[in-house]
Image (cartoon, rainbow, N blue to C red):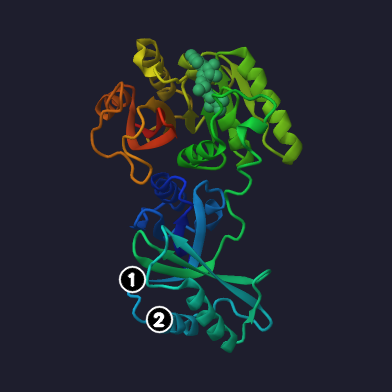
Amino acid sequence: MRCITGHVQAILVGSGWHPSLFRLEMEILCKVRPYRFGTRVVLVNSNYNFMNSLKKSATLDECLSPYGLSSDFSDIESIMEGWIMEQDLGYEFGKSIAVRWIRIDGGIGKLNGKKLANHCGRILKQKGWHINLEFPDVELVFVLDGISEHIFWGIRQISKHPREGWIKRAATERPFFKPISLDPRLARVALNLVIEEPDGIICDPMCGTGGVILEGSILNQNMVGIDLDKQMVSGTNENLNWLNKFHKNLPNQQIIHGNAINCAEILKQNNIQISGLVFDPPYGKNAWKSDELRELFSRVLTNIRNAPGISLGSRLVSFLPIKPGINGKDESIINDVNLGDYSTYELKLIFKKTGWSILSLHEIPVHGSLARILICAEAI
Ligand SMILES: C[S@@+](CC[C@H](N)C(=O)[O-])C[C@H]1O[C@@H](n2cnc3c(N)ncnc32)[C@H](O)[C@@H]1O
């Protein structure tokens, strides 16, 4: 890893679950705009040492550093040999290494990953490494990326997948579950997009069954939840008690019965300063058709802009229903688009009028006839 007073460079590979959210999450966690290759690979060059932040990611599969890359495959074996000879790769007498390879989008037709891995294994052996495929001290990983038509390689820096445990944490496993519960992965991405300082408090003013609050707890983040429905307040507390059985020393979270349109006043009364918000208003296929929901959404946005602690640049993430198949997951929504019952232009106007500016919009497919939009915005 090139690391001169905190300066770090790495190749990051997304899991493929949601490529455009992966790139945004990497930009925020690494505090720099990465250079992108295709949709699922980025190169980060940052003055901020982002390695610990990446361990919280919802979308990352691989972090490789030191790394190499090439789009010229004509003599890749010599390129690899030169790279391995130049790097020390943390070698010490007796240390073991494994060479792995992964393919994105079918890999690169001309390149045989196994053959290349064997070739590298032979060079590493000559350099004194033991090969241990099961429990190596170090892993050299190749990524054969059929999307950007590049090969990337480097030393794996995060061996335990940050996304490990999603299945166990599925909302259906909790004692209080409703179909409205937010997917833990989405909750985590949303939190990573708004958390700026780990000691701030993040508010979900429509917390429902506690999807965002629980994921925040796992991130060791102080959270406050509000919901209009008393059953949701007690249900979120029940889910938090359940979570505490599996995780030690989670922060104590406060869940309050109240109306999100009075969020600022509720927080003031309880002496709570927040630094960001994640929320998921009531939705359904036709939810946004009703003026009632538009009105509620605007009133909540206006109110939370005045919440204690929210100042210029504070971030929020919210979700709304849209018609499916508008943009897909690979790219964020940039142009003005009709989202079904409203357009991105209208959405931007609502945010602007209420004291927020939209930073990024992403389609989240749900099923054949429903999709949602993730809106990431900052206070203006
Ligand atoms: C889509 S659900 C939120 C789901 C939640 N993210 C979860 O993981 O369970 C919307 C929630 O907003 C709540 N709600 C609706 N109107 C509200 C209001 N005016 N103030 C506060 N909460 C409200 C509903 O009771 C419901 O629990």
| Amino acid type of the residue that numbered disc 1 sits on in the rendered structure | Ser
Find out if the beta carbon at label 2 lies less than 8 Å from the nearest ligand 1 atom: no
Circle 2 is placed at which residue position?
79
Left or right, 214 with reference to 262: right
The answer to which quarter of the image holds residue 358 is: top left
Q: Is residue 180 above or below residue 23?
A: above
Disc 1 packing (10 Å; few <14; some 14–19; many ≥20): few
| Amino acid type of the residue that numbered disc 2 sits on in the rendered structure | Ile
Q: Position of residue 158 (x, y in %)?
A: 57, 60
Which residue is situated farthest in the bottom direction here? 126
| Circle 1 SS class | loop
Circle 1 is placed at which residue position?
71
Q: Nearer the viewer, residue 36 or 8?
A: 36
Question: Contact (CB < 8 A) between labels 1 and 2?
Answer: no
The answer to which quarter of the image holds residue 232 is: top right
Residue drawn 44% across the image and 22% down it:
304
Q: Is residue 265 visible?
A: no
